[in-house]
């Protein structure tokens, strides 16, 4: 393409420098440059297209040169700038803004389509930087038609603005629907720690606890309550297992292994020092639940631990969320505390620290419908499972499981907020009721809203607790979905 030398050295050179500078502030910069052969009004009142040809091959010298600049911002938005310069000497001190032209004029004169092709690939075209035609040399249309043309371009910009507004509104509606996808009800499972007494070795006890954890995770259980049948007031995991057949701390060992498996792998060193109860926990199958994330996995939420790292005044603490960089939260917290963090969007890669906000542990479930693991609670006896319930309104639907219960196939559940499913130990719920000094009756069905046989017609005389959990939760799932108005198909 033949350029006028004076153009290359002056105004056009300034435009080239400006385009190069745009690469410092944008994610990507795309540039299209080409010739234009434009008509001009001659003294006789007629419009002609005249241009020079040079060389033996009669190479055409364009009357004008255009440059279309497409900017892709870090936010994903697209900006379009379009310039036209006459292919003749132009003073260097003339502002580049004087050469901005409507993109439609370049599209019509060159036969190229920019806006429509951009809109085919993305709806993020936010800005079309345009100006008036380049002096009178580009204003070859009669005044009346020129006004009509400008009106059409104005309408095009209005149309794009309207499309962008509609897209933003649709996005807001989508976000509202996403907010409504949260799961507001909870599912709790209670079982006696004595189920470990049925295992014959430390390895088998650990494996049994792992089976229980996997079953509860698969069916999105939010709380596991481990209750005692010996009358011990166990409310922490500080004890140790003392052997089968003795008055020991089976509940403590079961609770500790359940907590260990629920904790994301990158946080375990912070919360679980070496302990005899966890000697064989490394052999267990991982839960692989949604909050157990890989380092580079993208998510709105993450679990983390507050690290002992200095921060500026009026700035929040830093949290290790298992990512390449620590996350700075919105408040100062004590180091060593486990927190749930909502990560901020549109973080720039070059920032030293990611930003986040501390939220309640139930927020991922309640707002986004994500399963976010289970909590573990120790209860000294069966009655304490109910009296020490962490929910304000208690369990509004409680289910006891026993082969002496009613057939599960014939029942339906009312709507509820907090569901509790209780399993018995080696000798069933009857033994748990009998061992509870706070209860003055012997019939377990009195404790529950529903007392059900979840495996009628069983082929074995006994069903182990880890088996009963899988059978019961899979049987109850469609009934739960129907009760809360959220069928599995949704």
Image: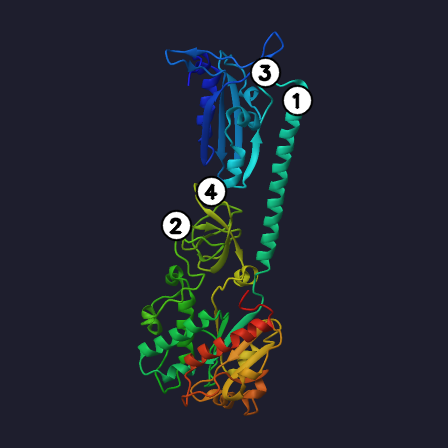
Under circle 3, the secondary element is: loop
Label 3 crowd bin: few (<14), some (14–19), many (20+), radius 10 Å: few
The residue depicted at 45 percent of the width and 29 percent of the height is 31
The numbered disc on residue 371 is: none
The residue depicted at 40 percent of the width and 86 percent of the height is 247
Label 4: which residue?
A: 348
Label 2 crowd bin: few (<14), some (14–19), many (20+), radius 10 Å: few
- First in sequence, mark 3 or 4: give its number: 3
* In front of the other: 270 or 255: 255
Under circle 1, the secondary element is: helix
Q: Nearer the viewer, mark 3 or mark 1?
A: 1
Q: Nearer the viewer, mark 3 or mark 4?
A: 3
Whether residue 331 is visible, yes or no, is: yes
Mark 4–mark 1 Cα distance, whole angstroms, equals 47 Å
Under circle 2, the secondary element is: loop
- First in sequence, mark 3 or 1: give its number: 3
- First in sequence, mark 3 or 2: give its number: 3
Q: Count the marks: how many?
A: 4
Q: Residue furthest top?
A: 43
Q: Is residue 410 left or right of residue 464?
A: right
Label 4 crowd bin: few (<14), some (14–19), many (20+), radius 10 Å: few
Label 3: which residue?
A: 135
User: Residue 457, how many percent across, how many down?
Assistant: 46, 88
Mark 1–mark 2 Cα distance, whole angstroms, equals 60 Å
The answer to which image quadrant residue 99 occupies is top right
The numbered disc on residue 145 is: 1
Residues marked 3 and 1 touching at CB (< 8 Å):
no
Label 2: which residue?
A: 324
């Amino acid at each position: 393409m033949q350029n006028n030398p004076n153009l290359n050295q002056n105004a056009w050179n300034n435009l080239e420098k400006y385009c190069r500078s745009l690469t410092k502030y944008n994610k990507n910069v795309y540039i299209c440059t080409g010739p234009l052969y434009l008509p001009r009004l001659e003294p006789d009142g007629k419009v002609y297209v005249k241009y020079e040809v040079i060389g033996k091959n009669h190479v055409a010298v364009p009357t004008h040169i255009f440059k279309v600049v497409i900017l892709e911002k870090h936010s994903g938005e697209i900006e379009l700038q379009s310039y036209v310069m006459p292919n003749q000497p132009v003073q260097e001190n003339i502002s580049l803004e004087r050469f901005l032209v409507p993109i439609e004029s370049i599209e019509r004169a060159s036969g190229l389509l920019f806006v429509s092709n951009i809109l085919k690939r993305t709806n993020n075209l936010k800005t079309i930087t345009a100006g008036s035609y380049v002096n009178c040399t580009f204003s070859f249309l009669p005044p009346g038609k020129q006004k009509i043309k400008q009106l059409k371009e104005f309408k095009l910009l209005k149309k794009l603005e309207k499309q962008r507004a509609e897209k933003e509104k649709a996005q807001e509606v989508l976000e509202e629907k996403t907010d409504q996808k949260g799961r507001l009800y909870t599912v709790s499972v209670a079982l006696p720690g004595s189920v470990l007494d049925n295992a014959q070795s430390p390895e088998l006890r650990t494996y049994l606890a792992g089976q229980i954890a996997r079953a509860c995770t698969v069916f999105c259980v939010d709380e596991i309550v481990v209750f005692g049948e010996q009358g011990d007031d166990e409310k922490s995991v500080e004890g140790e297992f003392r052997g089968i057949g003795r008055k020991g701390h089976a509940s403590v060992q079961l609770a500790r292994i359940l907590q260990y498996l629920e904790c994301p792998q990158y946080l375990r060193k912070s919360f679980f020092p070496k302990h005899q109860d966890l000697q064989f926990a490394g052999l267990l199958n991982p839960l692989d639940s949604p909050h157990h994330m890989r380092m580079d996995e993208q998510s709105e939420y993450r679990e983390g631990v507050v690290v002992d790292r200095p921060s500026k005044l009026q700035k929040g603490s830093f949290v290790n969320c298992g990512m390449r960089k620590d996350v700075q939260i919105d408040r100062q917290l004590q180091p060593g505390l486990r927190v749930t963090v909502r990560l901020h969007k549109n973080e720039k890669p070059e920032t030293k620290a990611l930003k986040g906000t501390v939220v309640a542990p139930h927020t991922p479930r309640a707002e986004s419908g994500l399963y976010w693991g289970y909590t573990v609670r120790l209860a000294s006896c069966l009655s304490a499972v109910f009296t020490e319930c962490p929910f304000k309104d208690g369990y509004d639907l409680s289910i006891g499981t026993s082969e002496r219960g009613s057939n599960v196939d014939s029942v339906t559940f009312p709507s509820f907020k907090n569901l509790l499913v209780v399993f018995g130990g080696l000798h069933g719920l009857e033994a748990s009721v009998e061992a509870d000094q706070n209860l003055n009756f012997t019939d377990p069905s009195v404790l529950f809203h529903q007392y059900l046989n979840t495996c009628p017609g069983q082929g074995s005389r006994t069903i182990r607790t880890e088996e009963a959990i899988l059978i019961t939760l899979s049987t109850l799932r469609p009934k739960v979905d129907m009760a809360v108005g959220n069928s599995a198909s949704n």
